[in-house]
Image (cartoon, helix red, strand yellow):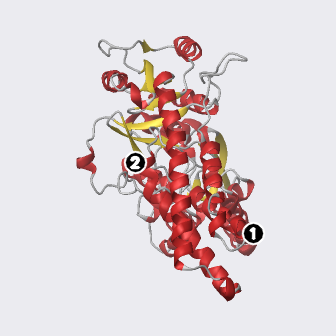
Amino acid sequence: MPPRETATDFRFPAGQRPAARRAPGLPLLAVDAAAALTAVPALPHPLLTAPLLFAVLWLNRRAALYRPTAVPAVLDELPAVCARIAVSWCVLAALVAALSPAHALSVRTLLTGCALQAAASCAGRGVVHGQRRRRLVRQPASALVVGPAATAQRVAAAFLRHPGCGIRPVGVLADDPAGGEGLPVLSTDEEVQRAVIQNGVRAVLIVGPVGEHGPLLRELAKRGCALWDVEANVPAYDRAGGAAYDKAGRTAPDRAPRERIAGFSCRRLDTGRHRDSLAKRALDVGVSGSLLLLIGPLLLACAAVLRVSEGPSVVFRQERVGKNGRPFTLLKFRTHRPVDAHEAATRWSVAGERNMSPFCRFLRRSSLDELPQLWNVFRGDMTLVGPRPERPYFVARFSQAHPGYAARHRMRTGITGLAQIHGLRGDTSIEDRARFDNAYIDDWSLWQDVCILLRTAVALVRPTGS
């Protein structure tokens, strides 16, 4: 990831945007609403249609049934749609029986209403999905393939052999130009801009490390392109039981299940804002603000001891990379004084520094030197729970060496995280950190944040470096 002073970010010319398609979520919602209306004759009172409609639409939304798959098929949705209709009718029947026993729904009414609504909903969804499949064949989405040239060419050829998947690769973006025969390999910003504008690119297939193309992917995502993470080399049976596959059937809206496109296991990278929800931000502000008030005397005491024992500048400020690659200034208590700015930016760890005073060593081993970052959380630069931020120098190195490391930056960086409570702090495996961080982002929930905060509080007594 280039430093701020270098102007290497990908930019489209003014007024030029790749064409983007909207996922047909609204037609599916309209179909489900119309299907609920077909059940009106089976209800004892027409006003009961409103709670039934609300329950069905809410459950379907929670199950991501209005987020169509890459290759839609009504049979894949049939169990989920019918199950949620049945649950809605059972809840409605229970409420009617509790509030007005004289109008309780009979078993026959219950079965008839469920059958009518399920048949209407599945039939309507079949029509919508059929039209979308035909449109995908007639007008496939142009795509770029990002990754090693040889792998990208192989994946592109496979997608071109299956036009029914609705994705048509038009170019390969790779650091190594030698990729054999196939699609043109794009190497300069001008070639990428020309390919994106002329072909109306609407999708990006990521088949390996993105290298220096992170700014390009962020720009394409902002312009409405869908980003797909494609498992190009690992067969599914080798990953049975793995974290990437064991959630394939979970369709909660804050998870991205893997799909089969042209025979590859693919996962759509969500570039939305749901992971930085209002609830998560409220937790950050509430906890960080309360802690700043409660431990204010402790912060002042640490600062006073550092001022007396180590001299001025007790607060250390350093540039770190945050969400979407944006830099920010991280605050810590100064426990080490580097020789120069270059050492501060490129030295990996100083947890075992012999020249460190006993008090500074205590601050690092107890993680008390991290407490000023609560102000970063309160300001919004960071979050309480998230991937740990790193310096730009190491972000560039690790993004090149470890696939998936750059994907950590799709969420706001945090003080603690899933990797840290598993002992991945200091001089530990970067590959393991990236895997745990991405697993946390994929499975994010507010309760998971609370659990990590509690486990972090317990782990603070352990004598580990940061």
Amino acid at pointer 1: Leu
Q: Is residue 322 above or below residue 372?
A: above
Front one among 140 and 102: 102
Do the numbered discs 1 and 2 sit on residues whose CB atoms are within 8 Å?
no
State the SS at label 2.
helix
- Residue 68 placement, left or right of 428: right
Q: Residues within 10 Å of mark 2 (few under 14, many from 20)?
A: some
- 10 Å neighbourhood of mark 1: few (<14), some, or many (≥20)? few
From this view, report whether residue 287 is shown above or below residue 185: below
What is the quadrant of residue 79 in the picture? bottom left
- Which residue is pictured at 46% across the width and 65% down the height? 421
Whether residue 361 is visible here, answered yes or no, is: no
- In the image: residue 43, left or right of residue 391: right
Pointer 2 residue = 430
Residue underneath mark 1: 47
- The residues bearing labels 1 and 2 have C-alpha atoms spaced at a distance of 58 Å
The disc labelled 2 sits on which kind of residue? Ile
Residue 430, image x, y percentages? 40, 48
Q: Residue furthest left?
A: 238
Q: Residue at x 48, y 29 (%)?
A: 134
- Give above or below for 290 relative to 151: below
Q: Quadrant of residue 327?
A: top right
Left or right of 226 on screen, residue 264: left
The answer to which of marks 1 and 2 sits earlier in the sequence is: 1
Residue 177: percent from the left, percent from the top?
37, 14
Q: SS of the residue at dot 1?
A: helix
| Image location of residue 410, percent across then percent down | 56, 44
Q: Residue at position x 61%, y 32% from top?
A: 224
Q: Nearer the viewer, residue 426 or 74?
A: 74
Q: Is residue 152 above or below residue 71?
A: above
State the count of labels. Answer: 2
